């Protein structure tokens, strides 16, 4: 019995590494960097400027103007520190206000 060059392991076309399904390869991507702590506060309750103005007994336009004047860009977020724990954050073209939590 003679061996042909195709039968020897050195010349075979078989890939020595096992094939990996595409779904498994996608799962082994490197993890994304954790987001900054301020950006992770998505669970905080934001209220519209109109609602916040009623709670603060202010005019809504005056509160919007105050947000505009105090606006600071923090990373990719535009926010305004309104004092007394009030933070206004701009979502698109509108402002939302976060009141301090009662537990703090």
Image: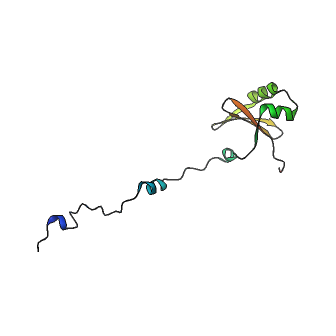
Q: Position of residue 29 (x, y in %)?
A: 48, 53
At x 36% / y 60%, what residue is drawn? Answer: 19
Q: Position of residue 47 (x, y in %)?
A: 77, 37
| Front one among 21 and 46 | 21
Q: Position of residue 3 (x, y in %)?
A: 14, 70
Q: How is the image coloured?
A: rainbow
Tally of marks:
0
Q: Position of residue 82 (x, y in %)?
A: 80, 35
Which quadrant would the N terminus be assigned to in this image? bottom left
For the view shown, which residue lies furthest in the right direction? 57
65 to the left or right of 29? right
Q: Is residue 22 above or below residue 87?
A: below
At x 84% / y 26%, what residue is drawn? Answer: 59
Q: Is residue 73 above or below residue 34?
A: above
Write down the quadrant of residue 75 in the picture: top right
Write down the quadrant of residue 22 in the picture: bottom left
């Amino acid at each position: 019995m003679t061996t042909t060059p195709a039968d020897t392991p050195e010349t075979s076309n078989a890939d020595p590494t096992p094939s990996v399904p595409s779904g498994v390869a996608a799962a082994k991507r490197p993890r994304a960097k954790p987001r900054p702590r301020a950006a992770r506060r998505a669970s905080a309750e934001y209220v519209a400027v109109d609602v916040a103005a009623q709670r603060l007994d202010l005019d809504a336009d005056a509160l919007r103007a105050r947000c505009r004047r105090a606006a600071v860009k923090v990373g990719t977020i535009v926010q305004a520190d309104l004092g007394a724990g009030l933070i206004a954050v701009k979502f698109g073209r509108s402002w939302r206000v976060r009141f301090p939590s009662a537990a703090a």
